[in-house]
Image (cartoon, helix red, strand yellow):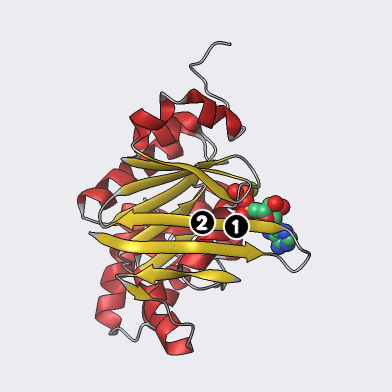
Amino acid sequence: ELILETVDLEYSYPDGTSALRKVNLQVQKGEKLAILGSNGAGKSTLFMHFNGIYRPDSGFIKYQGQGISYKKKDLTDLRKKVGIVFQDPDSQLFSASVWQDISFGPLNLGLSEEVVTQRVKQALLDTETTDIEDKPTHLLSYGQKKRVSIAGVLAMEPEIIIFDEPTAGMDPRHAQEFMQLLEKLSDEGKTIILSTHDVDLAYSWSNRLAIMYRGEILAHGLPGELFSRTEIVKRADLTIPWLIE
Ligand code: ADP
Ligand code: MG
Ligand code: MG
């Protein structure tokens, strides 16, 4: 069942940089999709389109079969369904304390205080941040900030959760815990999209994979099939750890 789809998406930045070139991507409900690409491939730009932060120059995005609308109210609805955890946690944290930051999203949805409290508690548990719930966000370590920014998105209970290079800058122990959290979310039926330049991670984690390079999807399919086509991985300027030249 198709949940999200892009059709011939094109986007250039105001300075003329062409960041997306006819991107056609299908996301199935409940899948684990990895977007693999080197720096500058267009992964973050693509994600900014998925919840309407950016609007394409041409082409369109469909959520559950419907072209997304850029009216304010429709965008608010879309952002309940499609949550993005940005690469830089500082762009997502702005409140006085961890608790306030995590509750900000669900409070804005107009949920009752009990429901918000319950969601925040669950998100704190899921991200192992209960011990720091009263701390000021600006005093947290990078890893803690990262987990709090994830908790804030989880508390919105989105259908699709997008993680932009989530393990970049995480220490190995937190990266491993994060991967366990992804498994749990996936088991709960969430659709998960993750971007990375880590070939090992993309290959081992995803059940479907898209390889991006310079604004284009070079290939899209099952990880096992794509990695036997090493020429694509090399063309995308990615390092294959297990391939000896
Ligand atoms: P990735 O997330 O895969 O590293 P990005 O989506 O950040 O790639 O970038 C895609 C392309 O767009 C790159 O060429 C990058 O330099 C360019 N780009 C990204 N952000 C901006 C911006 N704000 N203004 C101009 N060009 C940008
Ligand atoms: Mg980048
Ligand atoms: Mg990026």
- Looking at the rendered structure, the kind of residue marked 1 is Leu
- On the picture, is 226 further left or further right than 188? right
- On the picture, is 16 further left or further right than 199? right
Q: Please give the name of the residue rendered at 53% of the width and 63% of the height, measured from the top-left corner.
A: 9
Secondary structure type for disc 1: strand
Where on the picture, by quarter, is residue 65? bottom left
In the picture of the structure, the residue carrying the numbered disc 1 is 20
Q: Please state which of residues 123 and 33 is positioned toward the viewer in this rendering.
A: 33
In the picture of the structure, the residue carrying the numbered disc 2 is 23
Q: Position of residue 178 (x, y in %)?
A: 39, 43
Q: Please give the name of the residue rendered at 31% of the width and 76% of the height, measured from the top-left corner.
A: 116
Graded by Cα atoms within 10 Å as few (under 14), some (14 to 19) or many (20 or more), the crowding at tag 1 reads: many
Q: Position of residue 23 (x, y in %)?
A: 51, 56
Marks 2 and 1: CB-CB under 8 Å?
Answer: yes
Secondary structure type for disc 2: strand
Q: Please state which of residues 197 and 21 is positioned toward the viewer in this rendering.
A: 21
- In whole angstroms, how far apart are the C-alphas of marks 2 and 1? 6 Å
Q: Position of residue 152 (x, y in %)?
A: 42, 65
Please tell me whether residue 199 is drawn above or below residue 124 in the rendered image. above
